[in-house]
Image (spheres, helix red, strand yellow):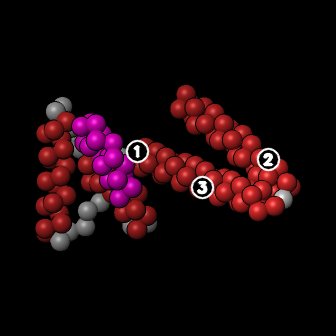
């Protein structure tokens, strides 16, 4: 519940930021002239970028949360993050070499292993891959 309230607060702050940008852009457009219209257009682009990034991240969070709720870790998960990473990576490599499909659970397990190793970039990348595979198999 705490995380949902935090996300809601961030969305409200983002909405206030967007409202402020829109208000400033409106002011620049009312001022007219090349500079006014140019600044207004730049702010509208910034506003659109803000909305797009926020939407993308919220959708990622919802999809990742949905997969996390459905994910059942393998029996006896390993305590050592490096060992868990090696097992998860070896499983995916084995499936790919055998020509078998890699499930979203396999990709999510690898993402969790990366997260345990504090490699957030790779964890997000593999979580996105898990989301894509899950959508393909629906």
| Residue topped by disc 2 | 23
**Between marks 3 and 1, how big is the CA–CA gap?**
28 Å
> Residue visible at 63% across and 33% down?
9
Report the quarter where the C terminus lies: bottom left
Counting residues from the N terminus, which is met first, the one under dot 2 or under dot 1?
Answer: 2
Residue 75 is left or right of residue 129, and the answer is left
For the stretch drawn in magenta, the main secondary structure is: helix
Mark 1: secondary structure? helix
Mark 3: secondary structure? helix
**Between marks 2 and 1, how big is the CA–CA gap?**
39 Å
| Residue topped by disc 1 | 68
> Residue visible at 71% across and 60% down?
38
| Residue topped by disc 3 | 49
Q: Toward which corner of the image does residue 1 lie, by quadrant?
A: top right
User: Do the CB atoms of the residues marked 3 and 2 lie less than 8 Å apart?
Assistant: no
Of all residues shown, which one is farthest toward the bottom? 99
């Amino acid at each position: 519940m705490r995380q949902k309230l935090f996300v809601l607060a961030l969305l409200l702050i983002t909405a206030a930021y967007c409202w402020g940008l829109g208000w400033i852009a409106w002011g620049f457009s009312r001022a007219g002239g090349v500079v006014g219209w140019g600044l207004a257009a730049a702010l509208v682009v910034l506003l659109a970028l803000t909305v797009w990034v926020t939407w993308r991240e919220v959708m990622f969070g919802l999809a990742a949360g949905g997969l996390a709720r459905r994910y059942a870790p393998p029996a006896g998960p390993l305590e050592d993050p490096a060992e868990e990473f090696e097992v998860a990576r070896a499983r995916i490599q084995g499936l790919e070499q055998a020509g078998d499909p890699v499930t979203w659970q396999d990709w999510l397990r690898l993402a969790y292993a990366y997260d345990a190793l504090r490699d957030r970039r790779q964890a997000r990348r593999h979580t996105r891959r898990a989301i894509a595979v899950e959508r393909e198999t629906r």
